[in-house]
Each structure stands twice: as C-alpha cells, then as structure tokens.
Amino acid sequence: MIAGVALALVALGGDYTDAVVKTAPAYDLNPPVSVEAAPKAQPDPSMQSSGAQGFQRPNVNPYDRDLQITAPLLFGRRALGELPITLTADDRVLIERTTFLDLLRDVVNPEALAEITSLIGERLIFESEDISPAGVSLAYDPSTLSVAILRIDPARRSRGEIFAAGTRQPESSIQPEPFSAYVNLDAFATAQDGQIDPAGLVSGAIRFGNIVFEAEARGGRGVDGTTEFDRRYARLVYDEPEAYRRWYLGDLDPEFRGRQGYVPLGGIGVSRQRRRFNAFRSDILQGSRQLLLEQDSTVTILRNGVVFRELQLDAGPYDLSSLPLLAGSNDVEVRIRDLAGRTQLLNYSAYLDPIDLEPGDFEYGAFLGVSSKSFFGSPTYDGDPAFTGFYRKAFVDRPAVGVGLQLSEAVQGLYGETQLILRDGSRLQFNAAASNSESGAGYAAGISYDRQFDRGEQADYLTVQADFTSERFSTLGNIALQNFSDWSASAQYSRYFSARLYGTVNATYQTFRMDLDPTWRVTTTANYRFTPRVRASIGADYGRTAFRSGDRQEIGLRFSITWQPDFQRRSEVAYDQRTDSAVASYSKSGDGRVGSIGYGALVGYSDGPANVSAYADYVGNRGTVAFTQSATGEDFSSVSDRTATTLSVGTSLAITGGRIGIGRRINNSFAIVGEHQSLQGRRVIIGDSLEDGRYIASSGPLGPAVFSFLTPFVDQSIRYDVVNPPRGYDIGSGIFRVKPANRSGFALTVGTDAFVTAYGTLQRSDGEAVGLAAGVMRSLTEPDTAPVNVFTNRVGRFALSGLKPGGRYSINLSDADGTAFEFQVPTDTDGLLDLQVIKVPE
C-alpha cells in the first residue's frame, strides 16, 4: 500500500535512465511447431481473417502490434483472478498457461483439469480453441477488457458449496517468536469509612517454544488488617496443537463434566479438546450429498417440511454437505425445476447430535494431584491425593456418550451421560452418577427433554428437566454431603409471535430434606420491540419461596423499558413488585480505542435500602484508568451514610523478538509493532479498523505499539498505518496476518528499506506512447530478489513500488520490439521518484 500519495505529482528532476537496449521479441515462448499456411484473404475494416474458411475474428486489437495485458478471468458472476494474455496484431488471443490452469482449479473437477493440461501440452501460451474438446469455451470481451468462460460441461464442473461458510482465509505467514514474556500490573485503592485499602494484582506468562509458565498473584489488606499476598496459580503448560492436547504441571484448574464436583489440585494434568485449538464449528451435515444439475435450475430446499432456501444455480455439480441442520433428525427435500419447467425431487434424512463435538471426535481430561481444602487465597494442598477425569465421544449417526471418574481416599464417584435424538427433532438427555464415601453410598440422576419447533424464519423452544440427588451422594467438591434438596424440576417454553414480540413461560419446583415446604414458582414474560432502539418487557410472578419469612405465597408484576440507540449506550428503568425493588441506570461503554471514555450511573432500592453509584473509565495508549463511586443507606434520605471510592490503574510490560513494549492489559497473546528506521521515528498506529483515524495502540516516546488482544489458535489480522509518512512511501499491505499460539508474542516492523515508489511515462523516440505494454522488473543489485510484473496504461504511464534507494533495476518489456532499459534510484530518495519521460527506440 502506498501511503500519502499526492494527487499532483511534482517532478523531482534528473534523468535516471541509461542507454536503451533492444532485444528479441519475448512474448512467443512456445516451442516451434509446424503450421500449414492459411489461404490469403482481404481483411475487412472491422474484422480479420483467422485463416479458417468462412470465419472472421472480431477486431479486439486496434493497434498494429501485439499487446500484453492482464485481464480478469470471469465465470458467470465470479471473478476468478487476473490472467496475463496477449492480443496479437492479427486479433488472436494468447493465454498464459500456468496462471490459467491455477485459476481454473476452482471451477473444474480434477479429471477435467488433467484433460485440459494434456491438451495444452508443453506450450506456455495457447488459444481458446485448443481446449474446446474438454468442454470449456472462452472468449475475450474488448468492451470490459476481460476473458469470460462461456461454458463448462456440467459433468466437468467442480462441486459447488451451496451453504459454504465463506472463503477460507490463507494460512498466516508470520509465526510467533520462539520466546516471549509479559506481565500485567493492576493497582487498586479503595477509600471507605475513613480508611484507604490498597491492593494489587500481578499476572503474566513466559513462553519458550510450546512450553508456557503462567502465574497470577494478588496482594492487599486482609480482614485482620495485615498485608496478605496470595498466589492464585502458578503452572507449566505444554501444547500439542496437532493432537489438540494440552499438558499441565503445578496449580491445576481441573475440567469436569456432568455431575462431577470441582476441587483445586496441585499436580499434573492432560486434556484433549479440538475446540480449544479450532474454535469454529458449524452444525452441518456430515458426509457427502451431491447434486448434479444438467441445466440452469431453480432449487428449493425444505427442512422438516419448511422452506429453508430457494436458489438460482448454474448447471454443474453441487455439494449439500454444508446445509445447516437442526438438532436431531432432519428430513431434507430438494425440489429442482429447470428452465423447461421439469421438476425433480430428492429426499434424504440427516442426523445431527448437538453435543459440542464433531461427529467422530472425542475429548478427555485427566488430572492427578493433592487436593486443597481452601477455595480462596493461596492453594494449600492439605487434602488427600485425588484423581478426576472424563471421556466423551461423539459417534457418527449415533448418540454421543460420556463417562467420568473421581477418586480419593474420602470419596469415589462414577458418572455417565448420553442422549437420544427423536424423529421430530426433540432430544432426551440422561445422566446418572453413583458415589461411595465414609457416610455410605449415594446416587443422583437426571433427565431432560427439549424440542425446537421449526417455523421457517422463526422457531419455538420447549425444555423440561427433572433431577434427583440422594442424601449421601458426594463428589470431590462436596464431601460434607450438603445435599439439602432432593427433587427439582423445571420447564420453559418460549415463542416468537412476530419479529417484534417474544414471550417466555417458566415453571420451577423443588423439595427439601429439611423441615421446609416445597418451593415453586411460575413466571411469564413478554418482550416487545417498539423501534430498533426501544424495547419493553412486562411479566408476572407467582409462587412460594421456602426460605422467606412465613413461607407465604407471593404474586407480583414487573416491567422494564430499555433504550439502546447503539451498541455503546444503554438506558433502562425497571420495577419488580414481588421484591419491591426498582432501578434506573444509564451507561456508555468505550469502544476500546485509545482516548475512549466510558461512564455510567445507577440509582435503585430494594425493599427499603437504597443505593447510588457512578463510574468512569479511560482507555490510554499505555494503560487504563477507572474510577467508581458508590453510596448506600437505609433509604434515600440516608444514602450518604456509607460511601466507597475506588481508583484503579492497569498496564502491561511485554518482551519478545528483542523488543520491549508498554501497553494495555494482555489477555493472552500480543504483538509489539515498531517502525522501520527509514520512517525516521514517525508514529505507527494499529487497530482493528483504523476508521476516522482511531486506533487501539500507537508507537511513541515510550517505544513501539503493543497490540494486546490476540486470540490463540485463530487466524486473524492486525491493521496498521503510518502517521504522515514520506510522500510515496510504500508501507506495505497495511495488514499483518498472524495465528498466535498460547501466550505467544510477535515482533512486527512497519516499513522496509525498499520503500521507494517510482513513476514515469514510456515513449518511443518519435513521441508515441508505449501503451498497454507488459514486462518484468528485476533488481541488478540484488539478483536473488523475485521479479515484479510491470504494466503501462494507454498513454504509457507506469508506477513501480518496493524500490530501494541506491538500487539499480532493469525492465524488460514483452512487446514486439523486446524493449529493455535500466535505471537507478538515487540514494537520497525519501519516498517518491519521478522518472519523467523515458524514451525507447523503435
């Protein structure tokens, strides 16, 4: 990308070209072949004879010489890419072999591509007639300067993805640095009751290869007034991305499933999860479903009897494998109507298990260590040695299953889960668990049913579930047998009545082992959208809460009105009659860019006590600042009795690739982005969009910019720009493509020593413009540099980027005269070089 190119180009003066050298014509690169002489014919002013009897070519080249141009290759409404072609003086269209075959891969199947390759043979350029036996027709359109694929035999087309999620992004070329480290520093101070309580939070990671050490600690005033320092966690993490596996050593945060209980462990662990390393998964049909259209047709797709999509498709094969499915059984009907009105039906059934695993995939976790009895502060690991683990498998066309095991001296537990998908798309889920502890054996079980009612663009949802837990059922996290409830049940039904009106009904029921009556509650809610900015909600509650005084029945109404003009601003007023509470709030969040400010306020009360609070936060280039003020009282007249003021400041320090950067808090991975020395200290800005000159980070007096928000194992872009670069300075594409690893860092540089952009006009000795010419530029000072294509417009103008000051370059044109010339870039060029008019001989 050329930054800051002036509209009026000022000549810099000087003649930087050497003697022009003539070479042999270079466009015809095919091996010599024997051609039978064509009979002579008198040319028509607008048509030229091809040599074939009775056929005349369109006049696609108005000049009396061959032209080399680059034209888009089109197929229907698709642009496949840029294709180098030669328009000869006798109106033939010669096509460059390598580029054409590469572009054709997207629209023909492998067998057709192999046949076309065989027809072209070893020739480097060919004509459209050469590949017509393979069922592919080409034509050059002089009005749009493009090459169109007029027809491909449907049997030779590649399969089209009707419901493809989108074009796949290319793999990133920039890899993380082998070593990186960062630390987040957050400081807090709270003033309350005449006392100031400072606190701090430190977190960070060090990465070398695929091994990461990560830790977090907190310090502050304890309950007894003394200063405390707590280690939240400290552990080593090792990733095997190809196997979707991660290993842990140190303070463990064990993963659990189903009815397993959580407990902190100090030891070793391993887990396998595909979604950790590949976060994107769509609910699509597994397996190939192909559709071959002999003619252009209208295709209507019905899912469970409801029209899902109607498409106008060209002739050729298509793949329905990416059809989005609903949970459970899907009855799919495809109706095909061709141009003659003939109709064909295709029916099949597909099954989708909604568990968060790809069909055929599996996941597991196993964690072994010493348990900690404390869930707060630093882990002490004063408990028993313990193991917790699980295994889940999603089968193809069968329900998924999961099993789990927890073991310690005090408790042993086993659990299992599965589900059945019924023909109507509903789902039955089952889970069960059994345990043994010093108090005896226990068990627990649950069942749930859910169904989605497909109504085309809208859907209704029904969920019903019931659970039972025995008194002696225990887990690693519940050894004390705190099972106060035995039975619980709930149901929910939601429905979209229209695009504006949405309603929900909920019912819950729970029984207890203590001397308490059952708790039950029924709630209804209706949500209505008046405008895109204003929504209202009204509902009613009726039920009994066992823990409320007198176990009385309660009934009440509630409502709320929300005004949200955009994603940053939101205002709400709400009242709940049952709890006698009300709240009014307004908030404006920052957009995450440097200089953004967020603020808000809230006023409310709940059955008497009142509270008022306000906050503000500021996003800076090197950190963030936040301020909160709150006040509470028995009522609004005494709301200032208890006040609290909190101020917090956060920043980070990052190191990678020999660079140090200061920026905002780092979530996982980061990039340190600095400027090349040729930019002479000019400021580099980075962000996700850079709209209106706004940015997320910037270089400056404190060093390079730090981009703190990279997500691991996801291919993503970092946009950059330069503030007031030299005129014509080539800063590159403006985008870095990266795919971070866990806790990884990148050291990126904006700019290069090849930053010069040159422009000029190419003319022959008689002043005629060398228009629509193509050629190749090569570096003479660095011969290993890849050559660059060069083109001129109709008046001979051309532009070249990526040149180095002091570099010497040669340009060879592929015209009939085989023109070549050389030029040198002055060493003091600061960005833009005017080569003025370059004269080439006839």
Image: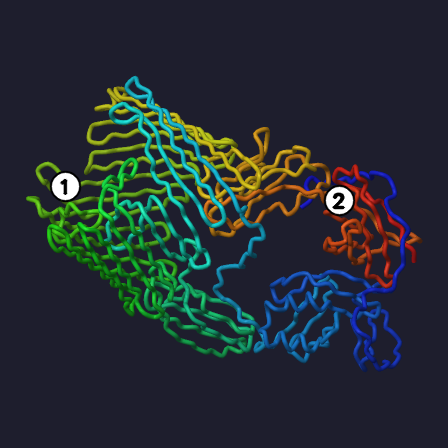
Identify the mark nearer the N-term, 1 or 2: 1
Residue 276, position as x, y percentages in the image:
41, 53
Q: Amino acid at mark 2?
A: Lys
Q: Residue 628 lies in what quarter of the image?
A: top left
Q: Is residue 242 left or right of residue 795?
A: left
Q: Is residue 193 above or below residue 442?
A: above
**Front one among 44 and 658:** 658
> Residue 804, which numbered label?
2
Residue 554, disc: 1
Residue 136, percent from left and from top: 65, 75
- Looking at numbered disc 1 in the image, what kind of residue is underneath it? Glu
Label 2, residues with CA under 10 Å away: few <14, some 14-19, many ≥20: many
> What residue is shown at x 25% (from left), y 63% (from top)?
428
Left or right placement of residue 74 versus residue 650 in this view: right
Colour option used = rainbow
What distance separates the C-alpha of mark 1 from that of mark 2?
80 Å
Q: Nearer the viewer, residue 191 or 807?
A: 807
Q: Is residue 717 left or right of residue 408?
A: right
User: Which part of the image, by quadrant, shows the C terminus?
Assistant: bottom right
Q: Residue furthest right?
A: 766
Residue at image position (53%, 78%) is 340
Q: Quadrant of residue 589?
A: top left
Residue at 32 percent across and 69 percent down: it is 398
Q: Nearer the viewer, residue 396 or 815?
A: 396
